[in-house]
Image: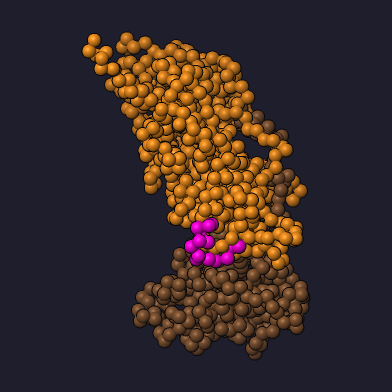
Amino acid sequence: MSDQSPISSVNDFVVRFANVNGSGSASANEMFARSILRHGVPVSPRNVFPSNIQGLPTWYEVRVTEAGHLGARGGIDMMVAMNPQTWDKDVASIEPGGYLFYDSTKPMPTSKFRADITVIGVPLTAITNSTYTDPRQRQLFKNIIYLGAMCALLDMDPKIVEQLIAEQYKGKEKLLSSNIHALHLGRDWALQNLKCPIGLRVKKADKVGDRIFMEGNSAAALGAVYGGATVCAWYPITPSSSVAEAFTSHCKKLRHDPETGKAKYAIVQGEDELASIGMVIGASWNGARAFTATSGPGISLMTEFIGLSYFAEIPGVIMNIQRAGPSTGMPTRTQQCDIIACAYASHGDTKHILLFPEDPAEAFEFAAQSFDLAERLQTMIFLMLDLDIGMNHRLCRPLKWDDARQYDRGKVMTAEMLDEPGRDFGRYLDVDGDGIPYRTYPGTHPTKGSFFTRGTSRDRYARYSEDGAVYADNMQRLVRKFETAQDMVPRPLQANAAKPTKCGVIYFGSTSPAMDEAIGLLEAKGHHLDRLRIRAFPFHSSVASFIADHDFVYVVEQNRDGQLRQLIVNENGIDPVRLVPILHYDGSPITARFIANSIADHQDHLKVTPLRKVKS
Amino acid sequence: MTYIAKPKFQHPGLPKNDLGFTHRDYEGKVSTLCAGCGHDSITASIIEACYELSIEPHRVAKISGIGCSSKTPDYFLGNSHGFNSVHGRMPSVLTGANLANRDLIYLGVSGDGDSASIGFGQFAHSIRRGVNMTYIVENNGVYGLTKGQFSATADRGSKSKKGVMNTDNAIDLVAIALQLGASFVARSFSGDKTQLVPLIAAAIRHKGASFIDVISPCVAFNNHAGSTKSFDYVREHNDAVNRLDVISGRDPITVDYAPGTVQVVEQHDGTRLALRKIDADYDAHDRLAAMTFLQKHAAKGQVVTGLLYVDPDAEDMHAHLDTVEMPLNRLEAGELCPGTSALEKINASLR
């Protein structure tokens, strides 16, 4: 061993499990994360997985963080190396003084280890094979055995893990007892043969509170249930498929007529993304609340229909779970890279409304709200999640709903309204000056209110027209409507530094927890920043005033080209020099360390030593 | 698309249907298609069929894609909502609309370019889902609006107006619809109103995916010697399989009764289709036989018209999805939103 002392930390470390895809490790790893939560200690787990079904490497990283920093931290304090394919890289990635946990059944040459880490060998295969004969059982219980060993090494309360296993296998007594047996096999071996606990420890705390542990995709799908969506049309694409799957399972529990058992929703798996968005538009045109879930390539395919939605003014909701592009890109890695593609989707002059939730709780709220916005504004709403929020469990505040809340169905003229004396119905008539016209649902009235919906130019009464002035009048009204949207979408949230500062930072979406943590790191280095979290496009006027109030503003995003920054410059006429891009785009979630280092570097460069001081 | 409104004047003595509507109540705007276009005859047949069925005009949703045929929904049922959507995408828009409200009548109007080329996939998938609709393809084998290019239904060996020979094989939408499980499949000719009107009426009454391919000559680009979709060619090669009649508890629609036997088909809603066969051994309930029959005549260069196949017990997409009877677009927050107590349980399960 070198003189590097082992890392010692209570409730603040990162454990990474290196596994083989399809080996059944996911549920054991998730149980590890959940059991730490049950100790009252916040965790932030992340799946790092390949675009593959079986055989390729996969990792599960758990950040244990009593301080509640839920962003990725970077660096690994303990590696549970269960995959020989990635051994060298996995061992190399451990922080100096960190720990390596491995299956010591077969002896490893010392050259495969490092001198500056603590190596913990547990003969997992030997223990497993001496207990189980069935190959599938051997594979699955091996995962629970290492969970048991980890339990001893990290000083976790075995009663808590037992309780979780009991909840998971409720009603399946045989599975329950065999899992608990496997847990103790691993734990007992570690207690008898190893020095337990190691320097990393889990200690009971009270830092979780009433928070829930949920994936963003499931939360967004539940938001769609609460928001009254009745039609979901979708096409499978990573990382969005679990939105439609979660919507299906939520609806099965929450949306069947108690008497007839019939479904109060319709879910159709389309033949492609074009059909999915076509069904959404058809259903919304006909007065149902409809949505699709997709990712970048799907957005590209949907753009013609998105333009129709904009121009013919048909509501709809697209949940875009972003992944690294362009083209097929890195389908299982995260990015915030479709901002421009969604904001200006489709040919001709178009602009669309984007919502940027930061976590599952906001994904739930914004998803429900997006249906109100879509029907109020009669246009497509994009709910912009990403893989990091969508496919990872995230600790967040409990979901809330107000039972007094009514759906805003927007400006819809009923048969009674059409019959009012003097009532003039023009589908594209701006009666209220907010750019939003009235619509009617098909089948409303025998003789009044019907109109022909089309993607071609038309006048205020929906009559075909190629008159330039008529066309321009309509396009200007669409701009007015977009301005109206500014005050309806979620506003940016501002948090000021402890000390007055002329530096600001703008960020959005899944960057949120890393940004919050980075602020603390920067303050410790003497850098103070006011911060503004943008939650929607079109930008509220407070975005421009925030920029005006600061000498320069960092814009932190997870894409190469600074897409949000471009959008701010473009839409608000801001001098680009005043917006400094901080860009992370390697497909991993952004970390506080990255943000803090990038901003600190930039700040240090700004500290120009005055010439006369040098002379003296 | 037309911007010419038809005058509202109508003769007081015009005959009325059961609901008190006259023919004029089923009309739309003045067509802007070429004089003599087969599509206008189809429009007239749709108007006639809806009048005869005493459909409330506003209970129909007419949806189309892009092209000459897709313009026609503006020329009939002026009191219905219409949707001229995106090229080749009528089927998905119609499917979505149908999901939202199962109570309306859905009329999908498309062309051969719209359904056999750009929209071939959507055509196929809407049929295999069993969407309750009447899907009419106004088939002229040519792209009219872009001045006469071949479409995918143009027969191999046929010539364009410019004299270019089509070397690609033709897609027969009727054969595909049969293979995909459409529960009502027919073909007709725009010039044969006596056959087409009852076919449309029967298709509207049918609960399930009804598909009618209507050969509709393009007077501008595909009505010349060498075309296999011209008026003259189709008239000479037309081989009608049957005649049918819709009885919906009122006087039958008059058709040009041809000699032969009558086969009565009872549908779910109680209306009956009376099939008048020309071929004594033709059975419109046999899907496999229909496919063979079609192919046998196609090999002889004959266009088979009439009702080729119907499954009166067909189930539609809503039956497959087991949706509530109430249209989804009429469900209110009270029925859709599970509320706070359910959410608290969900929160508790996530700790």
Question: From what the image shows, is residue A35 above or below residue B278?
Answer: above
Please identify the quadrant where the N terminus of chain A is shown: top left
Question: From what the image shows, is residue A573 above or below residue B82?
Answer: above
Q: Quadrant of residue A110?
A: top left
Chain corresponding to brown in the figure: B
Nearer to us in this view, B269 or A325: A325
Can residue A219 be seen here? The reply is no
Please identify the quadrant where the C terminus of chain A is shown: top left
In the displayed structure, does residue B339 sit left or right of residue B69? right
Nearer to us in this view, B164 or B301: B164
Question: From what the image shows, is residue A556 above or below residue B104?
Answer: above
Q: Is residue B43 magenta?
A: no
In the rendered image, residue A268, in percent from the top left (x then y), is placed at 58, 53
Q: How many marks?
A: 0
In the rendered image, residue B97, in percent from the top left (x then y), is placed at 61, 59
Q: Quadrant of residue B224?
A: bottom left
The magenta stretch spans which residues?
A: A461-474
Chain corresponding to orange in the figure: A
Nearer to us in this view, A265 or A523: A523
In the displayed structure, does residue A215 sit left or right of residue A547? right
Can residue A408 be seen here? The reply is yes
In the rendered image, residue A275, in percent from the top left (x then y), is placed at 52, 57
